[in-house]
Amino acid sequence: MRPGAVALAVSSLIVLGAGPPAPAPPLPARMADTGGGTQLITAVAPGRASTTGTVVWWDRGKDGRWVKRGSAPARFGANGLVGGASRKQGTSTTPTGLYGLPYAFGIKAAPRGTAYTYRRVHHDSWWCQDNDSRSYNRWSEPRAADCRAAEAEQLIAYRAQYAHALVIGFNYGRPVRGRGAGIFLHANGRGATAGCVSVPEDAMRRILVWADPARRPHIAVGTRSGKTAVTRL
């Protein structure tokens, strides 16, 4: 993906005596880049140190207007959010940015109506996070010979989180070693994440039924204050 900035916050000008201000346009309409598709997920935290926020999913109609289709409380990394281009692996930070959503996966069967390619998790399904492996930041089934088990996630071990998930395309197209691997939009676990974005399982199911790969959905992760740069990678 090409580099570029995505603004997640704009200021409003209120003129005294001019009557009530007009409602602010929906968030996607205020963004510099939404990925070019007609579906968008926004994951917004109050600030860069936040571990909670809100996920909203949107459709863009033929008239160009963005319409909110659903929302859910979100959880972020235990150490907050950081710009995707400067993120380091193992820091438990959620990378801000605008990313594609390559495919879905889950331990449970895909919700009825899911249009995304959906990969079922098996006992030998792994996500490689080994910087020395040729399978870095990729699904590996079985675990690749050059991917150390200590540097990989056995997906089935995360039964709550990976009941249903979408791969977030952070550091995915051309992986940079040490930047991070295995960033997903997934169902909630017990608390903050290790860098992913999570929502309640019911919301995750609704997102999977809503998302249409033909409409090129993206996810934009950022802060309400706009102080964390959102970079498209």
Image (cartoon, helix red, strand yellow):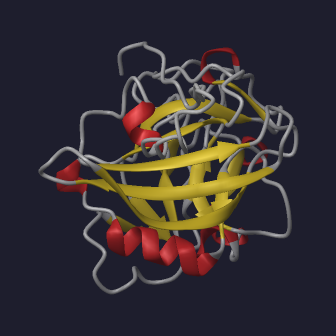
Q: Quadrant of residue 150?
A: top right
Q: Is residue 54 above or below residue 130?
A: below
- Pinpoint residue 190: horizontal percent, then vertical percent: 85, 70
Foreground of the two, 222 or 175: 222
Q: Is residue 85 above or below residue 127?
A: above
At horizontal 32% and vertical 33% (from top left) the residue drawn is 35
- Pinpoint residue 103: horizontal percent, then vertical percent: 37, 55
**Residue that lies at the very extreme toward the front in this rendered image:** 17
At horizontal 81% and vertical 33% (from top left) the residue drawn is 90
- Pinpoint residue 165: horizontal percent, then vertical percent: 52, 64
Is residue 189 shown left or right of residue 218? right
User: Is any atom of residue 188 visible in this view?
Assistant: yes
Is residue 99 shown left or right of residue 188? left
Foreground of the two, 110 or 216: 216
User: Is any atom of residue 141 visible in this view?
Assistant: no
Foreground of the two, 138 or 124: 138
At horizontal 37% and vertical 26% (from top left) the residue drawn is 33
- The quadrant in which the N terminus is found is top left
At horizontal 25% and vertical 69% (from top left) the residue drawn is 115
Q: Is residue 196 above or below residue 228?
A: below
Is residue 217 shown left or right of residue 98? left
